[in-house]
Amino acid sequence: MSQHIKIGIFIPCGAQFLDVACVDSLGTMSKKYFGELARAVPSFPSHVADLAPDVSLYYITTPEQGSDIPLTSGAVLKATHVYTDEGVAPGKLDIVVVPGPDPDSKFSDASLSWLKKQAETPGVDILCICTGIFICASAGIVDGKRASGPRGLQSILNKRFPKVKLVGDNYRWVQDGNFWSSGGVTNGNDLVAAYARGTQRWQQPVVEMGLMLTEVGDRGQFYTEATSQFYLKFAWQIVKGWFLGWTTGKPKDGSSGKKVDKQI
């Protein structure tokens, strides 16, 4: 069992903030985090902290992107590395996490080649979050594998990447070899919890205490709501939005250009 786990978070051109945030659960399962808790909280079991490994996280982007990585909600993440750095070359990392970008994003051949080499390196696991499947599938590392991905984008993914065996209508997360993938956004929390529990990188008391501290990992692998129900609820919100927009935009006195105060 490794005493130092090295995790690379690969963000070539921006990502969903919540997709990136799931790595914090893995970051808590570290000697540093548990040690700080043991010093601050006398009742915290220091012997569990002794079981925790060192965990290093590397935020990796492309030379073209530069050090500022844009995230949603106006956040900006400072990159620690670009993929061409020797410190994050294939063979130097244990885990590569791929958060989800805008599905229309374009990725350079060189960056996709780096990710493919990481996936082909023995002992390296790839954790794909939400629309990170667009990066991973573009790199060719999902061909022939089962993968999840956002439920609302399954048809788009099927058309763009026909070699991928998509199961995202039913699976919140799924593993196929060293490739782990999740559905939309906060399903990344469920994925990293399942990964930490399923791998041998961490001692189990460290995993369970880390997940208790972050309060994630209790949802099941399968969605409890049928895909048809998911789409029906989504469609209903579209209809409600259209109706709300129509009623709030209609002049209440029959004239044009007068703002309406009516709300549904």
Image (tube, helix red, strand yellow):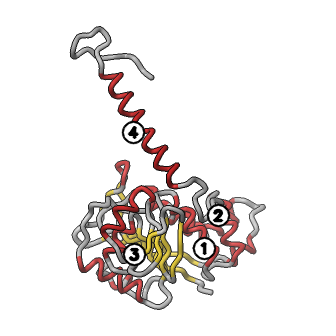
Q: Residue 32 is drawn in which quadrant?
A: bottom right
C-alpha separation, residue under disc 4 versus residue under disc 3: 30 Å
User: Percent from the top left, x then y, of residue 6?
Assistant: 49, 79
C-alpha separation, residue under disc 2 versus residue under disc 1: 9 Å
User: Percent from the top left, x then y, of residue 5?
Assistant: 54, 80
Q: Please give the residue where the numbered disc 3 appears in the rendered image.
A: 164
Q: Residue at x 60, y 84 (%)?
A: 3
The disc at residue 238 is: 4
Question: Crowding at label 3, few (<14), some or many (≥20) Cα neighbours within 10 Å?
Answer: many
* Secondary structure under the numbered disc 4 in the rendered image: helix
* Secondary structure under the numbered disc 1 in the rendered image: helix
Question: Crowding at label 1, few (<14), some or many (≥20) Cα neighbours within 10 Å?
Answer: many
Residue contact at pointers 2 and 1, CB within 8 angstroms? yes
- Of 210 and 136, nearer the camera is 136
17 lies above or below 120 = above
**Front of the two marks 3 and 1:** 3
Q: Amino acid at mark 4?
A: Ile
Question: Crowding at label 4, few (<14), some or many (≥20) Cα neighbours within 10 Å?
Answer: few
Which quarter of the rendering shows the C terminus? top left
Whichever of labels 2 and 4 marks the residue nearer the N terminus, that label is: 2
Q: Residue at x 66, y 71 (%)?
A: 207
Q: Please give the residue where the numbered disc 1 appears in the rendered image.
A: 196
Residue contact at pointers 4 and 3, CB within 8 angstroms? no
Q: Residue at x 34, y 73 (%)?
A: 162
